[in-house]
Amino acid sequence: MDETTFVLRGRRLVTLLDRAVEFARMEKALDSCFSGTASIVLLEGAVGCGRTELLQYGAELAQERGARVLRGAGTENDTRPHGLVRHLLAQLPAASGTDHRHVPAAQEFTELLKESARTTPLVLCVDDLQQADGPSLAYLLHLTRAVRRARIMLVLTDSLHERAENPVLGTELLRHPGFVRVRVEHLSAQGTAALLREHAGHPVPAGPAERLHALSGGNPLLLRALLAEQPLPTYEDDDWPSPEPGGPFTKALLTCLHRSGPDARTLASAVAVLGEDATEELVARLAGTTSSATRHGLAALRSAGLTRDGRFSHPAAVAAVLDDLTATECRALHGRAARILDECGSRAAAVAGHLLAAGEGEGEWAVRALHEAARQSLVADDDSRYVVACLELARRASEDERSDWELGLRLSAVSWRLNPAAAEQYLAGPLAALRAERLGAAAAGQLARLLVTQGRIEEAAEALEYVTRASGSAAVGSVRSTREDPLRELFALPPAEDRTAPQPGGAEEPAGEQPAEAARTVSPELRSSASLWTHPGTEADEEAIVRLLEGTPLAHSTFDPMVQAVRTLVHTDHPDRAVTWCRTLRPEASQAPGWNAVFGHLQAEAQLRLGDLAGAEQQATAAMDAVADRGGLFLFGPAATRVLAQTAMGRYDAVARQLQMTVPEELFTNVYSLNFLRARGHYYLATHRHKAALGEFLDAGRLARRWGLDRPQQLPWRTDAAEALLALGEHRQAERFVLEQLASPDARSPRLRGVSLRLRAATTALRQRPKLLTRAVDELRRSGDRYELARALADLGRTLQMLGEGSRAQMVTRRAWHLAAQCGAVPLAEQILPGQSGGERKTNTPSKERTETAVATDTDQLSESEKRVVSLAAYGYTNREISAKLYITVSTVEQHLTRVYRKLGITRRQELPMDLHFETLEHSA
């Protein structure tokens, strides 16, 4: 490191950092002066690099050695002629009696100085020579020509890159035999560390020192400005905060720009705006300067340590420069930069960045650049906010109607991640163009897919019908085959007639329409729209879902098929797996609120189907919060799930408040209306408005059939209607709805079949009910839905009680109550065991939870014989009754139970788990 400490008269004067060579040359010139030979030292350097400090040190050194020192400086504010000369003469004793209103001639000025130097060496220190007035510069020029053998020394500082008023002076200085030119550079990294050490009084860790050097560019003025803002770090891993806006660093940097020449600020602004794309040619075009002026100005910035490789050394410097511009100036620069970069064939992302900063763009070139930047971003980094911003600006810049529609389609596809309501609104223009028959077939196909994604099945069918007319009868199939992501092909439905079972109608259908006729009248376009929304969930589909979810990252192009895959898990008796995948795939709400809400809604649905009412309410609420005020019609999806959960928990006041929300007419053209109608119906059912509930369920069924979405696994509206009819005493009509549902292909689902069997039992004779309810319990146990299982067990307990089997009824009822309490289903628990105290519930729950969960995990250890015995014992059958039903001895029953108790870690019959198979009970019933 080049560091020298000088001592004057026994005291430490200053530590010159990276300046030993410069000072040595200046000291040698001073020696020449004292020996009778005139010398001139010109200190050249960029602003802030220490010229003035070195000048002051030279003056102090000369004064210390006995020389007379005259100090002066050029100032841009002093416009008086001979201002510098007057200031110098005022310090000269020989001229103390002179009337300074009348400046002597240049020859007389020179003679006065020479006369003074005969007795004492004379050192003239002039700072900022480039700003001195013209007449004073002429006097100094005369002096340099006239003195050769005199004890006179001129120490001058000059800006390295600022153009001088009188360029002749610089040339004449070169003619002088005692002329010394000293270049003052910015500090090296070692010099910066030494300055920091001097400032702190102790060594500064290398890490912070390097960061400060990078931030200041080695410019001592900027470095001291930074030190004025923050205390020095004391640890290696301490970071240096960004400079304060408008603080010492910003002011010092702007001062450097102001004093680096007339073009420096303009060029600095161009460099800051262009950023990584800054080149000398582009900077010159943006700043509007000549090549020569550009080279000169950029050299000044580089010499001051402000730039490196043609760019600012630190983002803080860029921010300081841009903050000095007005908003109008900044936008105008970005707009010009965008056009220049586009003309030069630069990256679309670079052009788009400037257009976004400018906030406007005009012409086809701007639309093209913004669209291409958005496309590249989706592929490279999937930054949806950036993509939406690009497409929004492109849409404003577009002057073509068709381009506007296409951009609306793209905006809808991307903005769903952030703002579902906006995604719906972006389709208004394309949809209007479709209805005016002005939209192209390809755009109409894309519109159909987007409408399906938003649940707008009927409008999607309208778009597909348009495609069919425009492209021929094969168009519907082609729409499916040209989807953006081929993974969605995994979920294509077979033809509706192959999967829709005939459904008997009845007087309960207010419209008088036969279900089979309704199914046959579903148009091919509606079937195609429905197939893009849901699918039957066969075994092959489940394997495809696993491959898709395990091997595909969540991205813009994969979002739709992955949502469809998880939705299938929810609706095909795999809600537990759906919950796991929702937790895995769900992005942060701050990053992708729309996607977060979609997966949150699916998780809420899955948890509701598992009987986790509190969890369903929590996830539905979180989904709604993620897109609050920007959820559009989608918001009614999680709202319906929350209403269902809160209704089951008995929180009727909260539900009533929710149902006061304004329901737009458009909702009933959307899939999300189906569950909303169903949820509202269950609230009416729970609050004893049975006819209103029936109307809601039937309306949901009509819409589902109309849209080709009559899938009981997805919307079990028939059993909902049957429940309302039972409450109204219409057992025969309720039975017909239940039988319809049991006859559907979806009835293979354990959950759907269990719920249907429970309601079927309610329509049969008392003696037949235990068999049906036992089967319902077994199906619901396999489905994992604890809430519906509790309802089935409760019905079974009541049935057994009515049949006089009190012991078994008590056992089943106790387990039903326990499950209801676990689910938080307060009304159901109260219905099962009226008046059960909260204290008793709190006491029983922990031990029962151990029995029903921890113990249940050990039931796989049981043999088939032990399972048959324990299945009957769990329902309260005595050992003798079990012996008679299974045709084994009482001793064998006792031995089986002893082994079961030991394997399960329990001590009594009341602790036997209910989640065992019930085939034996079913057969014996």
Image (tube, helix red, strand yellow):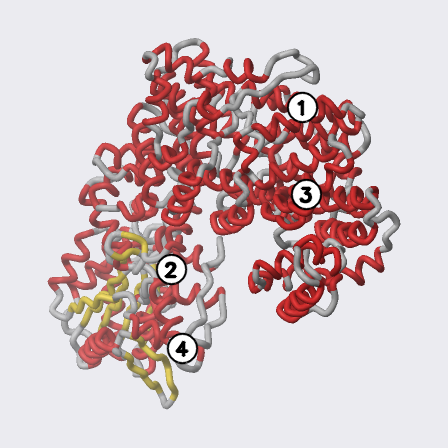
Residue at 71% from the left image edge and 58% from the top image edge: 873
Q: Name the residue under label 2.
A: 99
* First-in-chain label (4 vs 3): 4
Question: At numbered mark 1, what does the secondary structure look like: helix, strand or loop?
Answer: helix
- From the image, state whether disc 4 or disc 2 is nearer to you: 4
The amino acid sitting under disc 2 is Asp
The amino acid sitting under disc 4 is Val
How far apart are labels 4 and 3 at the CA level?
Answer: 69 Å
How far apart are labels 4 and 2 at the CA level?
Answer: 55 Å
The residue sitting at the right extreme is 835
Q: Name the residue under label 1.
A: 736
The amino acid sitting under disc 3 is Glu
How far apart are labels 1 and 4 at the CA level?
Answer: 86 Å
- From the image, state whether disc 4 or disc 3 is nearer to you: 3
- From the image, state whether disc 1 or disc 2 is nearer to you: 1
Residue at 86% from the left image edge and 52% from the top image edge: 836
How far apart are labels 3 and 1 at the CA level?
Answer: 21 Å
* First-in-chain label (1 vs 2): 2
Instruction: Return the residue nearer the eye: 693 or 398.
Output: 693
Question: At numbered mark 2, what does the secondary structure look like: helix, strand or loop?
Answer: loop
